[in-house]
């Protein structure tokens, strides 16, 4: 037992440490990119979005077709998110999200289903799933 | 007493750890993140269980075949708690890191809500204090303080488990009942132990009648002020002295007086702060004794033909046993091993017993003159079929046990005192 504990702790520490450092560097990079991009945009004064960041717009009825556990879109603050891959990872459990699949979920997201508010972490995670805006 | 089949206490401990698995499988509405949740549930159940064990109920002495063994299990459970809960956190980090490295980073980073924080504080307490007490030699009073801080983890852990988003405990009535009951009992035990114990313990009052210090060993005798403690030879007691200079914590020591003796006797080697301060105590000092505990005795060994092996201060339980030997029925060979001849301060006392008891033989071994005591030299005088009782420094006992086993002595014949707390 006395020999196993340090081994486990070192493995855990290495994993957590590398995620922490890796995530931090990636975040800084992406922030740098986005400031570069926005400065490029403002300098060229381009009216259109860069193609890689091109966003579609959807109608509420289009979104409402994606209302199952295997295909779940949400509308939050007029943005459309495809959270299908996230369902299993939601800290509150998938069952908290499922009732809103295909629907307007701004209020549920803002109030954590009526029990409080999501952290800025949740806001940041949500960005990963943005697929477009509401028309 | 080291009996090789697992004690009912050990089996119960395993049960405590695995019960969350069927409860989770049967009653949880959604089965996501199984490993993450089960590591947490088992870890929390074991944490609560370990706090309950620390209450030193007399019942546990029986369930674990001696409190010394219970403390050994307690230590192993602590290790498992650290492993399970560290895995719980690491798996969570991995889960978010799989979505994206940034999500993983966001999860570790500290701007999360209160229940997440409670979980982290509990984990930090458990990991740091378990490492401190397990891998560093620390004074007994620091050890007690560390244990007290460790207990706080149950409150943080319980809060985390109940209020963290996605908690299965809130959605699963069976898990709620199980973890809830264990944690509540643990919480009460913790409060009872840390706040009320000194007043509620069933300690009996004694008074020091004499104290002699020889070779850094205090030989203390006490007489009962109320009823004397019923015990058998080889058991130990938790004792607290009423002296302003001394810590008011209880410390465990082996009782060296014979079992029929109403007075108590402790032979305590000055190995740490507390045990050195004890040497300054004066006759007339009051003491409170919580006893008896332990299962290490000649009356519990399978054979009446016995070999007792003592290393240094490990002689203490054998002093009690030698003084309690019935006139007939047993045949005992005692090997009393010390580093130098001066250290063997109990030889003359033991020789008196050998003079009176024909079936009790004493072999004194002084390492500087006779060399290290080996199984070979023991087995030239004593039969292989005897029961072997060992008490002394861990390294010496391990070495002699291995040698005995290599010479064909069965595991079940070897018993040793596992107490090494103080």
Image (cartoon, helix red, strand yellow):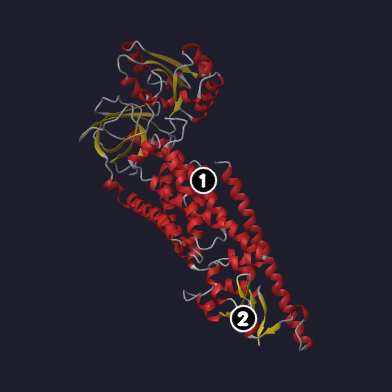
Task: Return the x and y of residue B334 as percentages of the image width and height.
Answer: 41, 18
- Name the mark nearer the viewer: 2 or 1: 2
Quadrant of the image occupied by residue B344: top left
Quadrant of the image occupied by residue B255: top left
**Residue name at image x 59 percent, y 65 percent:** A89
Task: Return the x and y of residue A86 as percentages of the image width and height.
Answer: 62, 68
User: Which chain hosts label 1?
Assistant: B
Secondary structure beneath label 1: helix
Judge from the rendering whether residue A133 lies leftward or rightward of residue B326; answer left or right.
right
Query: Which label number is shown at residue B79?
Result: 1
Whether residue B272 can be seen here:
no
Judge from the rendering whether residue B45 lies leftward or rightward of residue A73; answer left or right.
left
In depth, the one of B165 and B238 nearer the eye is B165
Q: Residue furthest right?
A: A44
Above or below, comparing residue B299 to residue B19 in the picture: above
Judge from the rendering whether residue B44 lies leftward or rightward of residue B204; answer left or right.
right
Residue bearing the label numbered 2: A64
In depth, the one of B231 and A132 nearer the eye is A132
Above or below, comparing residue B251 to residue B320 in the picture: below
User: Which chain hosts label 2?
Assistant: A
Query: Which label number is shown at residue B273?
Result: none
Quadrant of the image occupied by residue B316: top left
- For disc 2, the neighbor class at 10 Å (few under 14, some 14 to 19, many from 20) is some
Above or below, comparing residue A135 to residue B400 in the picture: below
Q: CA distance from mark 2 to mark 1?
A: 50 Å
């Amino acid at each position: 037992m006395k020999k196993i504990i340090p081994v486990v702790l070192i493995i855990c520490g290495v994993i957590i440490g590398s995620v922490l450092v890796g995530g931090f560097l990636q975040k800084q990079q992406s922030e740098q990119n986005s400031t570069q991009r926005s400065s490029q945009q403002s300098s060229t004064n381009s009216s259109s979005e860069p193609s890689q960041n091109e966003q579609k717009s959807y109608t509420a009825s289009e979104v409402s077709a994606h209302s199952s556990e295997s295909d779940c879109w949400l509308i939050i603050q007029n943005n459309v998110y495809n959270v299908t891959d996230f369902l299993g990872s939601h800290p509150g459990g998938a069952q908290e999200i499922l009732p809103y699949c295909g629907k307007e979920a701004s209020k549920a997201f803002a109030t954590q289903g009526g029990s409080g508010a999501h952290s800025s972490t949740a806001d940041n995670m949500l960005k990963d799933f943005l697929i477009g805006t509401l028309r | 007493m080291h009996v090789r089949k697992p004690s009912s206490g050990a089996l119960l401990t395993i049960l405590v750890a695995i019960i969350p698995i069927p409860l989770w499988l049967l009653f949880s509405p959604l089965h996501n993140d199984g490993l993450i949740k089960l590591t947490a549930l088992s870890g929390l159940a074991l944490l609560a269980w370990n706090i309950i064990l620390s209450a030193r109920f007399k019942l546990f002495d029986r369930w674990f075949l001696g409190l010394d063994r219970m403390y050994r299990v307690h230590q192993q459970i602590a290790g498992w708690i650290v492993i399970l809960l560290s895995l719980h956190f690491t798996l969570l980090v991995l889960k978010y890191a799989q979505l994206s490295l940034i999500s993983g980073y966001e999860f570790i980073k500290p701007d999360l809500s209160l229940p997440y924080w409670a979980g982290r504080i509990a984990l930090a307490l458990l990991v740091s204090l378990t490492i401190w007490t397990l891998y560093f030699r620390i004074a007994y009073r620091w050890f007690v303080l560390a244990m007290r801080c460790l207990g706080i983890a149950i409150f943080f852990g319980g809060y985390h488990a109940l209020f963290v988003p996605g908690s299965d405990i809130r959605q699963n009535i069976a898990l709620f009942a199980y973890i809830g009951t264990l944690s509540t009992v643990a919480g009460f035990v913790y409060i009872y132990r840390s706040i009320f114990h000194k007043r509620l313990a069933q300690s009996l009052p004694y008074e020091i009648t004499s104290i002699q210090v020889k070779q850094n060993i205090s030989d203390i005798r006490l007489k009962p002020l109320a009823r004397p403690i019923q015990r058998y030879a080889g058991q130990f007691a938790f004792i607290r002295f009423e002296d302003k200079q001394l810590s008011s914590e209880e410390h465990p020591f082996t009782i060296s007086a014979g079992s029929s003796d109403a007075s108590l006797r402790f032979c305590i080697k000055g190995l740490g702060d507390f045990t050195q301060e004890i040497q300054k105590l004066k006759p007339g000092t009051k003491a409170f004794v919580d006893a008896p505990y332990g299962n290490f005795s000649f009356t519990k060994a399978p054979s009446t033909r016995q070999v007792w092996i003592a290393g240094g201060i490990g002689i203490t339980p054998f002093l009690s046993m030698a003084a309690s030997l019935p006139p007939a029925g047993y045949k005992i060979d005692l090997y009393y091993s010390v580093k130098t001849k001066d250290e063997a301060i109990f030889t003359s006392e033991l020789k008196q017993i050998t003079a009176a008891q024909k079936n009790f033989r004493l072999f004194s071994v002084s390492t500087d003159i006779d060399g290290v005591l080996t199984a070979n030299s023991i087995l030239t005088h004593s039969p292989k079929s005897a029961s072997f009782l060992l008490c002394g420094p861990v390294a010496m006992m391990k070495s002699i046990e291995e040698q005995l086993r290599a010479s064909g002595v069965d595991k079940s014949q070897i018993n040793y005192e596992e107490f090494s707390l103080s």
